[in-house]
Image (cartoon, grey):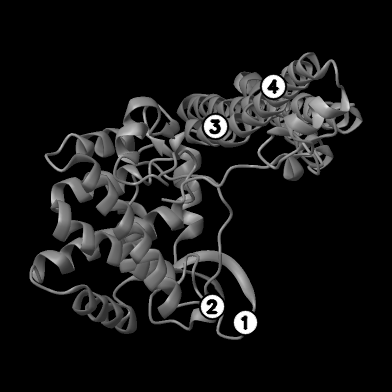
Amino acid sequence: MAGIKPLTVFQVIEWQMAHIEQAVVQVSQCSTTLETEANSFEGKVARSTDYYKGQAGDAARTRAKTDQGQILATEGVLDQIATKTSALVEDIKTNISTIKSGIASAESSRWDLYVESDGTVRSRKSNAETAKDYWPAGAPAILAKEIETSNLTSTITGALQAIERADREGAQQVATFLEQLPNSVKEAMARSLETGDPRLDSILRDYQTDQSASGSRLWPTGAELELIRTVYPDFNSSMMTEEEIASMSDLLLRVDGPRAVYDYVQITEAADKRAAELYPDSKFEGQGDAFRHAYWNALMTQRFGEEWTTEMTTAHEKSGANIAQREAMDLFNNSRGREIALANPDASPEELRNLIQTEISNGTLVVVETKDANGAEHAPKLANSNIDQGRTGQLPGVGLPLPGR
């Protein structure tokens, strides 16, 4: 399983953090503006008692107070995002500086050291060569070289791992703040996403799930990772919600334990590969993505059953601030894949593929449309899967979520 592709020292030392720092400033300014405007607006309405009387006046003041609360709640979310992002940026900058310093120390070392992409420090000279160069003090020289190499490796890899944690888990933490937006804000956004098609608008609202109660973390680690690697040596950890982890741990406890996890990986990779082969031009939020989710769910339903597959694939969508259109698309197409498998329990993978492709051609599955028939871009919206692939497009990583159902 590919899992998360590790960062390299040569990637992170090229990162430029200035644009993120500028974004933090802008978010902070927006937060301050919202707070000022909300308090000013409510204060003006509250002072209307002398000239705006009766039930209408009371209703207006109550509404102003409610609106103020909603705006201040939104302001609080923006403030949390700015504060957390600022801390993450400083942490990453500090560790990048540590890595650069470690690389410089390695390159200037008398032991002819160099740094590999994963942060490991090695010498270009073997111990035999070092012993020869420093004879008759060869043994102490080798020891000194090994100590410096080990210390630099520990420093650089530690900083790289800290950056990975901040980048992966920290970004997820920031995204979850968006889940704290008032439902009134989310509902207002939902109205702006409607297409006018009753079926699609119903899918948009109904196929949403709540955010994970405990966020996301890397899985597997420790003993579970070692157990899986007895069957699949190349297995790597991935970021998963706690609900996903519960499902995967349950799978690991089955009679065929590690083999079941291996089969899950093979099914996931098979769905990715087949989608890329069939729909290379619509991998993200298009027909390729729709096929991948439906085929994935169909294959897993056959292997693991509908209940586990439903739990696992729904848990997969519980990451914070999952964009509403993407979440609805994925959950709906997941559901259709399971239904196809249940209706065709003896179908081969190729027969499932044909059934799902027919659904796409008939417009039964859903995609995200980002361009009109003339190619002009517009706000993303759900669409039936039989539109031209060129009208679909990739969405940002996170966005404003809708309330779960």
The residue lying toward the viewer, choosing from 66 and 337, is 337
Residue topped by disc 4? 150
Mark linked to residue 169: 3
* Residue 1 on image: x %, y %: 41, 50
Kind of residue indicated by mark 4 = Ser
Residue topped by disc 2? 391
Helix, strand or loop status at disc 4 = helix
Residue at 11% across, 64% down = 342
Left or right: residue 69 versus residue 191 is right
Residue at 16% across, 51% down = 304
Few, some or many C-alpha atoms within 10 Å of disc 2 (few <14, some 14-19, many ≥20)? many
Helix, strand or loop status at disc 3 = helix
Kind of residue indicated by mark 3 = Glu
Mark linked to residue 375: 1
Task: Give me the C-alpha separation between circle 1 and circle 3.
Answer: 37 Å
Q: Quadrant of the C terminus?
A: top left
